[in-house]
Image (cartoon, helix red, strand yellow):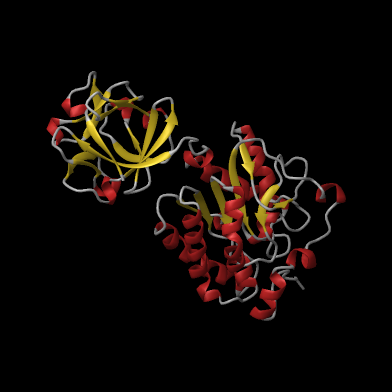
Amino acid sequence: MRIRTFRFATAALGTALGAVAASLFALPQPAALAAIPGESNGGVRVMPLGDSITDGYTPYPGGYRVNLWQRLAAGGYKVDFVGSQTNGPAALGDHDHEGHPGWRIDQLDANIVSWLNSTDPRTILLHIGTNDINQDYDVANAPARLSKLIDDILRTKPNVQLFVAQIITEQGEPHATMVNTYNAAIPGIVAAKGSHVHLVNMHAALTEADLADGVHPLQEGYDKMAPVWYNALASVPASLQPLPAGGTTVVSLRAHADNQYVTAENAGAAALIANRAAIGLWETFDEIDLGGGQVALRAHANNKYVTAPNNGTGSLVASSTGIGPAETFDLIHDPDGAVSLRAHADNQYVTAENAGAAALIANRAAIGPWEEFDQIND
């Protein structure tokens, strides 16, 4: 008979026992591993967040984090895993995490603000919901609890890059079906949360044959999880880039070409153009100080960075998830009090083309009226 480690008789018992599940249910670990402290290599702060599957429960302390760390190191990324917990073998270069055996969504949510404020992660890897199902804890409302957790994360750290996993399978019914039902709700939740929240289909990576006890992965299963996380991170370059150290100012830009405000047209889906008479969400940008007179602009319309695509030959558009040369501009303060932007993509000035009737583009060698903007600090 297979034992399901984290199934409790009632929700009340689940609530009481969830907080102490690590001590009641965790298998013994070698003493040499238990005392390993967490480290920081000064890299981008990444928080592995979840339950025992994040912790690495069963005789595989570190879980997917071991193989993920190794992949990130091999890829040339400097990453600082963060969290209040620590465990794992020497092969894991950074042992910090926020995986809590036996915990449900609501228990993470009760602590998330303090954890985020303590560690200030750039990126979060969230795999949670297994214990809501195993404890039969109001499973029908588990997606709503996940949605609230995501909201609380974004409210506390609006610039975080959050990866939300559809959880791995369980062995046997009704739990396998319950997992499928819960997972089916996650894409819609993620899609409604904005451009900083990303769906990860972890469920497809493992089968029941990859489970050690019907719930937790074998080492081979954890090793299948790692490349899914890695590929998700690599697909969002901003998730592996630190936030700029400089300050951020909320601004709007009014073009001298036509005295209209620059807008991220169609909620950022279309090119920037100076054709608005008033300031609204689409006309508002975070101006991020990159140092040395350089800035990046992040549109409030979709929370993406303004880029000069195709080496500056394309119209400016808010479509980038990270800051690179194409998203970097020299901010030039003109003698008349206006500002101009020179794109690093081609070293040309941004112009409100056709007296503001056409999209902004970086294709001017000198500053004239079409290349000047009033910067309004909101």
Q: Quadrant of residue 165?
A: bottom right
Q: How many marks?
A: 0
**Who is closer to the viewer here, 334 or 41?**
334
User: x, y (%) of residue 192?
Assistant: 39, 59
Q: In the rendered view, tell whether residue 27 sits above or below residue 14.
A: above
Residue drawn 65% across the image and 41% down it: 69
Q: In the rendered view, tell whether residue 5 sits above or below residue 69.
A: below
**Who is closer to the viewer here, 21 or 366?**
366
User: x, y (%) of residue 51?
Assistant: 65, 60
Q: Is residue 183 left or right of residue 102?
A: left
Q: Is residue 227 left or right of residue 154?
A: right
User: x, y (%) of residue 184?
Assistant: 47, 65
- Res 127 visible: no
Q: Is residue 236 left or right of residue 329?
A: right
Q: Residue most toward the top? A: 365
Q: Residue most toward the front? A: 336
**Who is closer to the viewer here, 110 or 174?**
110
- Res 270 visible: yes
User: x, y (%) of residue 9?
Assistant: 69, 80
Q: In the rendered view, tell whether residue 139 sits above or below residue 118.
A: below
Quarter occupied by the N terminus: bottom right
Q: Quadrant of residue 104?
A: bottom right
Residue drawn 75% across the image and 63% down it: 22
Q: Residue most toward the right? A: 31
Residue drawn 47% across the image and 62% down it: 186
